[in-house]
Amino acid sequence: MCFLITMANTLFKGDLAEVSFGKETGLRANGYTGQTNWSHTSTTGNESTLTFGNNNYWVSGGNILLPDNVLVGSILKIEGGDAYSADDFATTKRTYYITGVDTTNATMTVQPAVLTGINTASRTGDNAIIDFFKAPTFESTMTDAAQQVKTDQFIGLLNEFAIPEPQIDVRKQHIVGLGRDVNVITSGRETMSGGNIQLNAHTMRWIKYALGGHTARSQGEFAFSSAAGTAVGGLPLNIKTGTPTSGTFAAQVYGTDTTDDSITAVNTDTLAMTGNGQTGNLLLGGRAAADTGTDITLDTNIATLFENAGATGGVFKVLSSAGAVLYGSYGTISSAVLGNCADIDSGALARAQTDNKAVYVLAAVTANISAGDIRVKIDNTNALKFTAGSTYVQIIDKDKFTIPGQDEAVTSRQVHKHELRRVIGIGSATGGDVGYIYVEEPFMFDHTATSCGVERLQYGSGSNRGSAHIDSTSKELQFGVTHTYFGHDVLPSFTIEQSFRQKDVEADSKQLLRLYSGCKATSATVSADTEGEVKLEVAYEASRHYTETTNTITPHRMFDNTANTTTNRKISGIAIDGEKPFLFQDVNVNVFGRPVLRGTEFSLQVANSTEARWFIRGYEGTTSDNDQVQHGGTQMPLEITEGQREYTFTMRAMVEDDRMWEELRTRRHHRNTNDITITMTKVGSNATRETATITLEDYTIMKADHQVPSDKGPVFAEIELVVRHMKVTENSPYYIM
């Protein structure tokens, strides 16, 4: 007799399973006369092959920086401003579906066939644009042998996690005259629903994916000095490159009113500040002279101090007398004078008109940004100071945005159009995109170049240079980032990476790795009771699954090869001392304008009414069992569309008076009055610790049950509200969500 013994390391086990997620971004291949950035190289039937050159920011060493066929099913459009006018989307509405991607040969096959003849090099104005939906962010360090996408984000403190496993619509054909059994079996469309994330909320980041709207603002970049006259790590982005730059600078210590206004030169090569006697994080800028009206006057010509300032408008930055960051705007520049200045933050202009104080002018945006763009243009000298993958770009905008559906007259319902994005690529002269920096998520808002300015951000292990950080002793959040989430018309999509292995190694030859892209949140629920952590549950569905079949993809192992340092943990969204969840004892609830002192539980749900959609689009390429995506992705949903959004808020509380019954009896509609607020704080000793506030801004009561208790105990009310709008504001150590 023999026995088959199955060893543990021959099984896929849950302890060796990994999950992570990442953003989805579009790609651009810029046409450029004189360079073969991309071209139409062959046609077979109704399918064309496009070849992309190394001058594209997402191609390196002849390889596309994305795994083979991971873009199958994505949409490509051509801006045919020159040689490719026959395929111009704006005039012809021709849309192409990607049916194959060959990483090694830097080619893509698309369907239908491109009309412009083969071997036609693209020229300036001929741009190939790949839509963000279902397009995972590329990893700039990827190689052909070690492929990856940028799914490096920590999902959260998971209690339960469900993949939207595909289900194939198998059609059974019964044929007349051929007996009772099924005669023909065919495979139809695939659905990928049922995804679910249940976690203890250490951030509210998933609310962004349920609501869609998002603004973010950090405190920006600083210089850091460890000793008199020195700078550590680098100087702020827009300080004039020079060896040295001579002029009158000033530096104010963050968090104080201490200012050194006798700095006579700054050397960006040696990182020296001649005459500076202060240490710590410093706002370095031009020395202000006393002024009034709407002008700000510096002691030195602005062009001497700063790399690139907008001649017809931009943004400046100062510190208050308490050392807090204040932004303001200007409309003109003349020599050493900023004109037509105004506050973005109250008090910014007056502070910049105070003698001896430091005024920093943000780098200018040199071209308008449209909502949906994936790049921002600045001067090339500043663009080259960014590093793909490890630096972030912050746009500070003086203009405001009214949350859709709200009352425009209520200014408190408006938000500034500040945005924060991770940089994933830098343009070049040969690429026809010099001065552009590319980001991993499309911009949400339109930005007029003269209304905004740019800062560069990056994480460090501590708080030097303004890096967001949680102090290990006090739990103080230093240089926290304010995120605001609100209802918007389009939901952002994301990619889930999930892998199984048999061995505890980074890349197991027996691994099963799957990518689910084009994911959208169908609903999200925030809840809490008196038994522990604030809970966050997100239901989602996907539009494409991709299975790695060649063992060339290196999976993300969160604490082995991804969030494996103090800095990388911040990048991935799991900062040290920031991983603890919000707890019920640190939650305050205000309802109907009063605090609820005897509430025992609450639940707030957002439902998006999303719907996956399939379209008739026959696949005419070849099909192989080795394809990671079958049939050119035609059996999978092409898109997921958003429907009506609904909010529901329920609460259980011990009855102290008749106010809840009166709300029901009188049918009060609270429109911009008595906002319901749910405020959560992390454990810590400082007022600057992590916080999140949910605000319900327009609501009415639907139900207020006051049942007679059979146990003769206290009366509890079961409350249900219908809500029109909600907003979430979070102060966190993360630049992106």
Image (cartoon, rainbow, N blue to C red):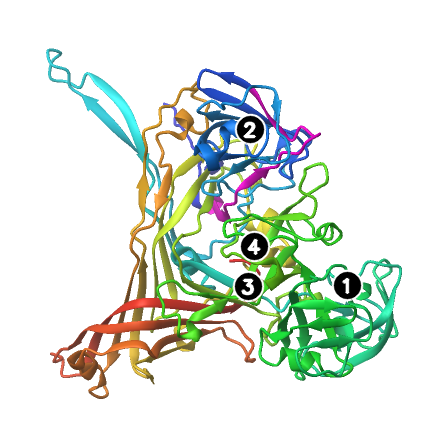
The residue segment tinted magenta is: 15-41
In space, the residues marked 2 and 1 are separated at their CA atoms by: 40 Å
In space, the residues marked 4 and 1 are separated at their CA atoms by: 32 Å
Indicate the secondary structure of the residue bearing disc 4.
helix
Q: Which mark is residue 731?
A: none
Q: Which of these two is toward me, 640 or 160?
A: 640
Residue 558: where, in percent of width, then height? 55, 50
Mark 2 or 1, which is nearer the eye?
A: 2
* Residue drawn at x 59%, y 31% as measured from the top left: 82
Judge from the rendering whether residue 153 lies leftward or rightward of residue 624; answer left or right.
right
In space, the residues marked 3 and 1 are separated at their CA atoms by: 22 Å
Instruction: Point out the tag, 3 or 2, that comes first from the N-terminus.
Output: 2
Instruction: Point out the tag, 4 or 3, that comes first from the N-terminus.
Output: 3
Judge from the rendering whether residue 701 lies leftward or rightward of residue 110; answer left or right.
left
Residue 436: where, in percent of width, then height? 66, 47
Q: Amino acid at mark 2?
A: Tyr
Kindly check if marks 3 and 2 are in contact, taking CB atoms under 8 A apart as contact: no
Quadrant where the N terminus is found in the figure: top left
Q: Which mark is residue 418?
A: 3
Mark 4 or 3, which is nearer the eye?
A: 3
Residue, disc 1: 306
Q: Amino acid at mark 3?
A: His
| Magenta region includes residue 37 | yes
Query: How many other residues sit within 10 Å of disc 1, few (<14), some (14-19) or many (≥20)?
Result: many
Q: Which mark is residue 84?
A: 2
Residue, disc 4: 572
Q: Amino acid at mark 4?
A: Ser
